Image (cartoon, helix red, strand yellow):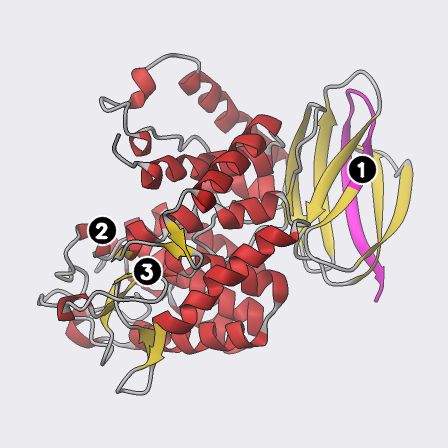
Amino acid sequence: VRDRTGDDVEILRSWGPQALGFGSQVAAHGLRKLAEGLWRNGNIVDGYAKKISDSEHSAEDIADTQPLLAATFPEDPEIIARLKQTTACSENWLIRQPDGFWRFRGSWFNCSEFSPNPDHAIDVHYNVRAMGPALWYASLTRDPAVIERVVRWAESWLRALRSTDHGKPAGVIPPVLISSNGSYLVRSQHWDKPNAFWDYFHWSGYSQEGLTNLLLAVYDLTGEKKWLDAVGETFQVLEHCGTFPRICSEIRQRPEAFYEWRRLTGSARYDAQFPNLPDTDATRALALMEGEAQKAVERIGYNFDLYTSEPMWTDRIPYGLLSAEYKSYLFGGDAPRGERYPTFAVTWPATKASFARAVLNTTGTSAELRLYSFEPQTVHIPVRLWRLQRGKYEWESSSVGREPSMRREFEFNRSAQKLELLLPPQEEVTIRIKRISD
């Protein structure tokens, strides 16, 4: 039997939103079983793939499982310890190069070893996937040594994004750098098409979004505005779409990092490029969610042979039913992804209660939710809050268009803290959470 766990874990990219966005007990149970099986099956050594392989493949067994497991069960110390173990691998991966910048030693590796092939001595955008568990660990623990390591690595990509050599537009991040000197012409005369063995190392909206997410991570971890400004630079090419139509089209198709930058800055500079930009208007938000949900129901309501001619390979089964905009209303940010730094504001733990949910607005000190219970009696609804600042908070519940009918106070003192809400039967309510003191 051929080992296809690297394909199996790709299903979790869809199970994660089911478990964390819709509170599916089945998805949460399946996620845990697959993640536990991968961790213990003998193919993981020192928290990473045992076999040396390119980072697109060597990273997925861990990046697609353990961070999502941590998001689903954040109180489990063993899961956090696993993230720490994988994070320790990055001490072997990132070194100071001859030009003074810190980069990956290569693109083919396990936890402690790299391919000796000199052509593999490149830092590629898929190395963000390998660093996914470390980014999650840094977010959850604020470990200063890990943060320093991530910042050093990001400095190299920051220099590359600002370069305009070889026809690359400023702000566009090359997908591959030569480890020793940071050059982005890799056995090719085209900055966007390096000869790096696989075409998925070429530039794309996916590569740009992943490296922009790295810059967002550094901003969140350090609070230094220069990193938020750098994120803004990655979108400046959108003002030159007549010259770079393909680049603009690719960036628009992967808007997750842009939506986070837009939320953080409030800048409307590039809004015209994103017609479905999430906003705080409840009518538009709920209409978009309803329309997309209906399309998803229609799509999965028929048997299309798993949408594949190769049903024996689980990575050939696409589950991409929800748009970035829908996920933004579900999580108050990008959906949890193990290969990306977490930027979501809320997750929804598993519960038997059936209810509709939307996150209309979030800041560091507030959140606004719209909920509707389908249950015949009042129910307790759990929600995890991930990005609030510490302090004393109040949540209030009100029927739409009416004065608040319920208020409760609580202390928020840690990320992923669970809050229990009371939801009346078959009534649309607004939940407003706000900080009332430090």
Give whichever of 179, 244 is nearer the camera. 179
Q: Is residue 349 magenta?
A: no
Q: In the figure, residue 265 lies in which quadrant?
A: bottom right
Q: Is residue 231 left or right of residue 93?
A: right
**In this rendering, does residue 323 appear at all?**
no
Q: What distance separates the C-alpha of mark 3 from that of mark 1?
A: 44 Å
Circle 1 residue: 421
Q: What distance separates the C-alpha of mark 2 from that of mark 1?
A: 44 Å
Rendered residue at 36%/12% (across/down): 303
Give whichever of 381, 357 is nearer the camera. 381
Q: What distance separates the C-alpha of mark 2 from that of mark 3?
A: 20 Å
Rendered residue at 90%/43% (across/down): 407
What's the amino acid at mark 2? Tyr
Secondary structure state at the residue bearing disc 2: helix
Rendered residue at 39%/46% (across/down): 42
Question: Where is residue 177 drawn, in percent x and y?
Answer: 24, 70
Question: Where is residue 318 drawn, in percent x and y?
Answer: 35, 30
Secondary structure state at the residue bearing disc 3: loop
**In this rendering, does residue 285 appear at all?**
yes
Question: Where is residue 11 drawn, in percent x and y?
Answer: 41, 34
Q: Is residue 434 magenta?
A: yes
Circle 2 residue: 200
Chain-order first, disc 2 or disc 3: 3
Chain-order first, disc 2 or disc 1: 2
Magenta stretch bounds: 420-438
Q: Is residue 436 above or below residue 249?
A: below
Circle 3 residue: 110
Question: Where is residue 158 drawn, in percent x and y?
Answer: 37, 75
Q: Quadrant of the C terminus?
A: bottom right
Query: Magenta region, mostly helix, strand or loop?
Result: strand
What's the amino acid at mark 1? Leu
